[in-house]
Image (tube, rainbow, N blue to C red):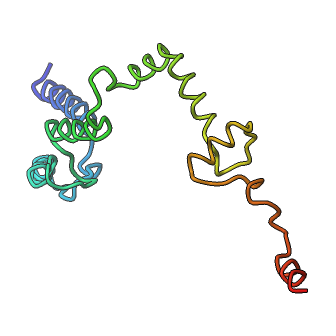
Amino acid sequence: MSLQTQLNSFVLRVAEEFNTVKGRTGTLTALTTTDKSSLVAAINELKAAILTAVAIDDLTVATTSTYSSSKIVSVLDALKADILGGADPAFDTLLELQQALQNDQTGIAALTAAIDKRVRFDAAQTLTVPEQTQARSNIGAVAATDIGDTNTDFVAIFNAALV
């Protein structure tokens, strides 16, 4: 085999490897960077963008940054404290509240019964005579029967008495 044939084979093999490498790396025009002159230029552009980007900012609420994990935890802790409002540790989760309510059905029934015995102002209500008497006593009101007929014509009575 001649030297020229061997060099031709070598050049073709090197070209084949270059094409494989080029196929794996893509073309510069496919870069989404502004500078597409070389991979080095594109990487440098990316590095500069990363260095100037503010990824963590514990002072500003924004869509372009985030709080640090410690700031997120402190915000969540403050929110939890606001929601709990100083609740006893035995009742500081929804599950604990659910269990307490489920375990005290007698207390719930007593509360419901007590609420049912309250005088309503948002709807008509049927009360027994003793319930009406107690409600009037509680608010210092008198019974309609104690007032008499509210449709009485007092002018007519007065005029009749003048004769």
Tell me what residue is drawn at x 22 percent, y 36 percent: 77
Taking depth in this image into account, of 1 and 159 the one nearest to the observer is: 159
Residue at 60% across, 28% down: 113
Location of residue 113 with respect to 134 vertically, above or below: above
- The correct choice, above or below, for 49 with respect to 7 in the image is below
Q: Out of 42 and 4, give the one closest to the viewer.
A: 42
Counting from the top left corner in percent of width and height, residue 102 is at 50, 16
- On screen, 16 above or below 63? above
Q: In which quarter of the image is residue 33?
A: bottom left
Tell me where residue 51 appears, x and y as whole percent: 8, 51
Residue 35 position by quadrant = bottom left
Task: Return the x and y of residue 30 as percentages of the image width and height.
Answer: 29, 49
Residue drawn at x 56%, y 46% is: 138
Q: Where is residue 37 in the image (x, y as percent from the top left)?
A: 16, 55
Q: Is the N terminus in the top left, top right, bottom left or bottom right quadrant?
A: top left
Q: Residue furthest front?
A: 163
Q: In which quarter of the image is the C terminus?
A: bottom right
Residue 32 falls left or right of residue 38: right
